Amino acid sequence: MTEDQGAAKERADKKRTDPTSQLARGELVHAEVKPLDLSGIPSVITGIVLWAVAFVVLLIFRGTLKEDGLDWWLWVPVAGFGLGLIGLWYCKRRWAAIQAGHRPATED
């Protein structure tokens, strides 16, 4: 074996093991992971419920918030609840369009 062949064999034995090199050599494969929920409706409903719970909790402490000048905090969950309703309307409309075949599920 010549000196060049020995050096080439030594380099081959010392393969880089970092993920970028492994990916370049095709040794790492990305798994196809599908989303759990395409509609998004359960996630939006969960957010709406959490905003409603936050409103009730802040309503309990309304007196303390008013004394501290933080009564505006009460309007934050109201805004979140309202935006959640808009999001729910959007998600339902989008999901209906996907189900009807007017729009691909992967769009957005």
Image (cartoon, helix red, strand yellow):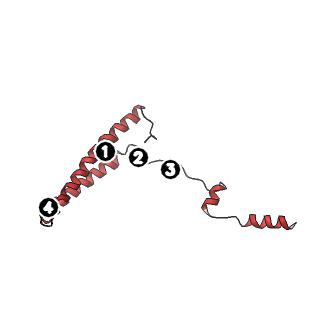
Mark 2 or 1, nearer chain start? 2
Gap between marks 2 and 1 measured at Cα:
15 Å
Question: How far apart are the alpha carbons under marks 4 and 2?
Answer: 37 Å
Q: Position of residue 59 (x, y in %)?
A: 16, 59
Looking at the rendered image, the disc whose residue lies closer to the viewer, 3 or 4, is 4
Q: Pinpoint residue 49: horizontal percent, then vertical percent.
A: 26, 52
Residue 33's tag is 3
Q: Quadrant of the C terminus?
A: top left
Q: Earlier in the sequence, mark 4 or mark 1?
A: 4
Instruction: Say few, some or many: other residues with alpha carbon within 10 Å of mark 3 (under 14 / 14 to 19 / 20 or more).
Output: few
Which residue is pictured at 20% across the width and 56% down the height?
55
**What residue appears at the point 75 percent right and 66 percent down from the top-left corner?**
11
Query: Alpha-carbon distance for marks 3 and 2?
Result: 12 Å
> Do the residues bearing badges 1 and 3 touch, measured as CB atoms within 8 Å?
no
Instruction: Assign a secondary structure to mark 2.
Output: loop
Q: Amino acid at mark 4?
A: Arg
At label 3, the amino acid type is: Val
Number of numbered tags placed on the structure image: 4
Q: Is residue 44 left or right of residue 57?
A: right
Query: Which residue bears the numbered disc 1?
Result: 87
Residue 41 badge: none
Q: Which of the two labelled residues, at mark 3 and mark 4, occupies the earlier sequence position?
A: 3
Looking at numbered disc 2 in the image, what kind of residue is underneath it? Answer: Asp
Rendered image: mark on residue 62: 4
For label 4, the SS is helix
- The residue identified by callout 2 is 37
**76, 91: nearer the viewer:** 76
